[in-house]
Image (cartoon, rainbow, N blue to C red):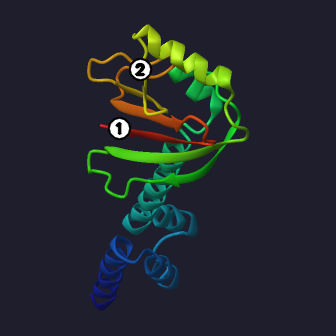
Amino acid sequence: MKRILIKLFQWVISLLCWLTISPIFYYLTNKWKLIGKKFRIGLLAISPMFLILYSIICFWGLNIYFSYQRKHRFDDKETLERITGVTYPDFKVIEYTKDSEASFLGDYNDRLLIEFKELPSAAFYQYLDSLIATGDSDWSIYDNAYSYRKSWGNGLPSPNGEDDKEDMMFSISLSKGSRQATINYGVW
């Protein structure tokens, strides 16, 4: 009877350890020789503590992936050209500002400051002027500052290559004679 109570006590302690502190479960079941090594390792791998750890690592990895995607979404020349319909000189991103007040629903508004490797040519600005003159582009000019603004999703059509189901807003602003431009984008 005493032996049965001791075994029962060992199993209860092992179960509690498996539910809370899994490495102790592994140690005690080995010490008390309650189950075999392969089964013990299998139970350790699916213990609640390790499942929580796996979940945390998974969510952390997804957060890193989505943060990377968010940061680099509009930082290449081809994407800007596809959305705005304008060929840009080569540029580099000199500053990225992440929205520190992103909402629970995932809404955000980020900013990229880019610098052209060379000053945009007069032909570049003439092309922008011609787009503005047509009146059916999303380009505008005010006091020698050119800007492009586009929102899509929620019934608004998206630019080429973007998803109509995604609620996005995008803008780029540049001043004539400046090598820098500002790109604002976000989800609304």
- Number of numbered discs visible in the structure rendering: 2
Pointer 1 residue: 187
The one of 170 and 127 positioned closer to us in this rendering: 127
- The correct choice, above or below, for 141 with respect to 91 in the image is above
Locate residue 24: give its quadrant.
bottom left
Q: Nearer the viewer, residue 79 or 19?
A: 79
Whole-percent x and y of residue 17?
A: 36, 78
Query: Quarter of the image holding residue 123?
Result: top right
Crowding at dot 1, Cα within 10 Å, few <14 / some 14-19 / many 20+, comes out as some
Counting residues from the N terminus, which is met first, the one under dot 2 or under dot 1?
2
Element marked by disc 2? loop
- Residue 8, above or below 64: below
Place of residue 85 in the rendered image (x, y in percent of width and height, measured from the top left): 55, 18
The residue to which callout 2 is attached is: 138
Expressed as whole percent of the image width and height from the top left, the position of residue 119 reads 69, 37
Q: Residue at x 33, y 30 (%)?
A: 167
- Quadrant location, the N terminus: bottom left
Give the residue type that dot 1 points to. Val
- What mark, if any, has residue 123 been given in the picture? none
**What's under tag 2, amino acid-wise?**
Asp
Which residue is located at x 52 percent, y 36 percent? Answer: 174
Mark 2 and mark 1 residues within 8 Å of each other at the beta carbon: no
On the rendered image, what quadrant is the C terminus found in? top left
- Is label 1 in a helix, a strand or a loop? strand
Name the front one of labels 2 and 1.
2
Give residue 44's position: percent from left, percent from top. 48, 67
| Disc 2 from disc 1: Cα separation | 18 Å
112 or 21, which is in the foreground? 112
Residue located farthest toward the bottom when viewing the structure as drawn: 2
Q: Residues within 10 Å of mark 2 (few under 14, many from 20)?
A: some
